[in-house]
Image (cartoon, rainbow, N blue to C red):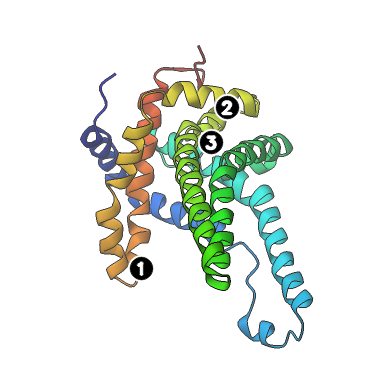
């Protein structure tokens, strides 16, 4: 299969000629769900905290709430968003109903499956986090201790950096291996999280780097959007999302009664 970025972007532009604003408003809603649904801690509130335990309790409460919102709202909405993108990229009539279908049917299974996929991605990122912790610890020792300890700290820091670098590569590889899980689940609500991961890995085999470069190709547009006080980047999202949806449609191939054909 010969897929080019120009081909995907041309198809995306064809879709957006008549559906740009629906894609824009729904992508804006996706940004709101993903970026602004977490607990926001007011700086003035932090100023009134008189002890360290209370400070970390507030931070911890915000983290827990943010995680819960992600699990029960953001992740399921992401599946509905992918379903919206797929449906409206293939059909002339714009429809919004599938955005909320996931909250009305199969909700608990969706929460479980999307959580498990997210958990697996997190576990694959642990080496990178361990490397970061080692580097931070070594830097602290280097700053506060003697020359002998500092030499050891430098060696440990170098080891931590290598662990971090290897973990970052592994985490990135897994991210693109799992890239299509939400798209697949949007069309295959009966699949388990293991099946979603397996099918995404099969679909993305040989296309991970291509997908990475395709996403990277939008950086110019995002930089231009950033010049406009960051607001301009919001107008790029529909173009990027429509393009990545075209990639899914190409990799998915033919359909059977509205669902992906699984070999």
* Among numbered discs 1 and 2, the one appearing first in the sequence: 2
207 horizontally vs 43: left or right: left
Label pair 1/3, CB-CB below 8 angstroms:
no
Q: Position of residue 94 (x, y in %)?
A: 42, 42
The residue depicted at 39 percent of the width and 45 percent of the height is 241
Helix, strand or loop under label 3: helix
- Mark 2: give few (<14), some (14-19) or many (20+) Cα within 10 Å: many
Label pair 3/2, CB-CB below 8 angstroms:
no
Extreme residue toward the front, this view? 148
Residue 196 tag number = 2
Q: Is residue 147 above or below residue 21?
A: below
Q: Which residue is mark 3?
A: 182
The residue depicted at 78 percent of the width and 77 percent of the height is 54
Quarter of the figure with residue 86: top left
* Among numbered discs 1 and 3, the one appearing first in the sequence: 3
Label 3, label 2: how far apart the Cα atoms are: 8 Å
Q: Position of residue 66 (x, y in %)?
A: 66, 59
- Mark 3: give few (<14), some (14-19) or many (20+) Cα within 10 Å: many
Q: Is residue 2 above or below residue 96?
A: above
Label 1, label 3: how far apart the Cα atoms are: 27 Å
Helix, strand or loop under label 2: helix
Helix, strand or loop under label 1: loop
The residue depicted at 63 percent of the width and 79 percent of the height is 42
Residue 230 tag number = 1
Residue 14 tag number = none
Q: Position of residue 165 (x, y in %)?
A: 45, 45
């Amino acid at each position: 299969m010969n897929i080019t970025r120009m081909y995907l972007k041309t198809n995306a532009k064809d879709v957006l000629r008549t559906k740009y604003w629906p894609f824009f408003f729904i992508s804006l809603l996706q940004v709101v769900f993903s970026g602004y649904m977490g607990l926001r801690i007011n700086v003035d509130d932090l100023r009134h905290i008189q002890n360290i335990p209370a400070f970390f309790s507030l931070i911890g409460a915000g983290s827990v709430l943010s995680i819960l919102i992600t699990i029960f709202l953001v992740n399921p909405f992401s599946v509905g968003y992918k379903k919206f993108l797929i449906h409206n990229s293939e059909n002339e009539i714009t429809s919004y109903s599938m955005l909320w279908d996931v909250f009305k049917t199969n909700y608990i299974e969706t929460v479980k499956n999307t959580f498990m996929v997210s958990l697996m991605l997190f576990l694959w990122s642990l080496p990178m986090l361990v490397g970061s912790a080692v580097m931070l610890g070594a830097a602290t020792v280097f700053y506060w201790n003697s020359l002998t300890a500092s030499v050891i700290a430098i060696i440990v820091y170098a080891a931590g950096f290598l662990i971090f670098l290897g973990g970052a590569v592994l985490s990135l590889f897994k991210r693109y291996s799992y890239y299509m899980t939400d798209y697949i689940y949007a069309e295959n609500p009966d699949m388990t999280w293991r099946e979603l991961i397996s099918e995404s890995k099969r679909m993305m085999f040989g296309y991970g780097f291509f997908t990475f470069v395709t996403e990277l190709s939008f950086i110019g547009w995002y930089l231009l959007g950033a010049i406009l006080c960051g607001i301009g980047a919001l107008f790029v999202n529909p173009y990027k999302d429509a393009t990545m949806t075209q990639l899914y449609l190409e990799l998915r191939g033919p359909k059977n009664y509205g669902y992906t054909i699984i070999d």
